[in-house]
Image (cartoon, rainbow, N blue to C red):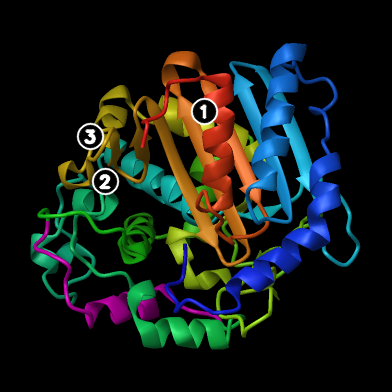
Amino acid sequence: MRIPSPASPGRCARIVALAAATALAALTALLPAAAGAAQLGARTQERLDRTLATVTRQTWNPGTIAGVWVGDRGWTAATGVADRVSGRVPRLGDHTRIGSVTKTFTATLILRLADQGRLTLDDTIDRWFPAFPGASGITIRQLGTMSSGIASYSTDAATVDRFLTHPTAAWTPQQLIAISAGLPVRFAPGAGFDYSNTNFVMLGQIVEQVTGRALATVMQEQLFGPLGMRHTTYKPLLKLPSPAWSGFTIQGAESGAVLDATGWNPTFADAAGQIVSTLGDLRIWTRAVGSGALLKPATQAERLKPNPHSERAGRAYLFGLGRAAGWLLHSGELPGYNTQIAYLPKRRLSIVVLTNADIGGANGNPAPAIFNALAATIAPGTLPSN
């Protein structure tokens, strides 16, 4: 998630310095697909290699790890640098913070609980948050589709300042929800679209209250374990599991500084953005969430219903998932990291992009920009034109 902050006059200088320090590696380091994996055709791989080399020159991230899979045949690459001190090339298995892609996991748990008859999407949230303002008029569906009207705690200036000043301090979901309870609502429930991290912190708390178990445990038992995602965790880790790459940001930076945000505390994101994962595990997840593998068909159909207030130019927000023309997708951002997952059902096509900076360039944040370029190469004409 991006933390709103004032623009800094030194931003361009910091970006240029970071790009200059990593340019040579970014242009030269491409790693092949993992040994034994079925690969896309040689010409397709060459086209994807060229696309990645071109688009990374137009973005401001030190390193990129990416994969494209059509069915079981794929292409993977790691380019740039993972650590500005050692200058090593990223590994395909490096652990990364996936930010708001976590929302796709939290939403899936809610939908599985609906499949199990333990809640419905139209339940009002006063059952779990009786003291929250207006809770009796807000539904689970509205939390998941960003139509609740609840303002995100991450839009509160004092909260953001506290996080950026003390980025390793721990936060509780109760703290985050209480901050939003004191903010003005964006609109009446169901009457708009506003991207709020608080919605998904609350969904995570609903999972815990319904199951009586910690969210990390439920994710492991119902999602990571069944799918064989052995390198994914919801634990609030300050130190990433090995191997891992470092993450860089200018959020909260003084003029001229690029900050290493690798060890910043992910509890500020909670169920909206705390997960740590890898390229290989996110390949598994992207197909599972896009195909509805863990849900009943009727429940997946409910998931894919858009918030009508979010629909614009072929894009919409669904239940913890986005849609862009035929693509089902979600991006994620924490200070230092940017992630994009996307699935095109009609082609069984998955794309995952990881970057170790959240510094936007002319084409926007790095992971979505790289995804757009790869999608245009492997499946031209399948994304909205704007």
What residue does disc 2 label?
Answer: 118
Q: Which residue sits at x=31%, y=23%? A: 297
What residue does disc 1 label?
Answer: 287
* Nearer-the-camera pick, 236 or 323: 323
Tag shown at residue 305: 3
Q: Which residues are magenta?
A: 170-189
* Nearer-the-camera pick, 15 or 238: 15
* Nearer-the-camera pick, 386 or 335: 386
User: Sequence-wise, which precedes: disc 1 or disc 2?
Assistant: 2
Q: Which residue sits at x=43%, y=60%? A: 272
User: Sequence-wise, which precedes: disc 3 or disc 2?
Assistant: 2
Kind of element beneath mark 1: helix
* Residue 350 occupies quadrant: top right
Q: Does 63 sit above or below residue 347?
A: below
Residue at mark 3 to residue at mark 2: CA–CA distance: 21 Å
Q: Is residue 220 left or right of residue 192?
A: right
* Nearer-the-camera pick, 20 or 107: 20
* Residue 131 occupies quadrant: bottom left
Q: Position of residue 71 (x, y in %)?
A: 59, 16
Q: Is residue 87 left or right of residue 216?
A: right
Q: Position of residue 18 (x, y in %)?
A: 74, 65
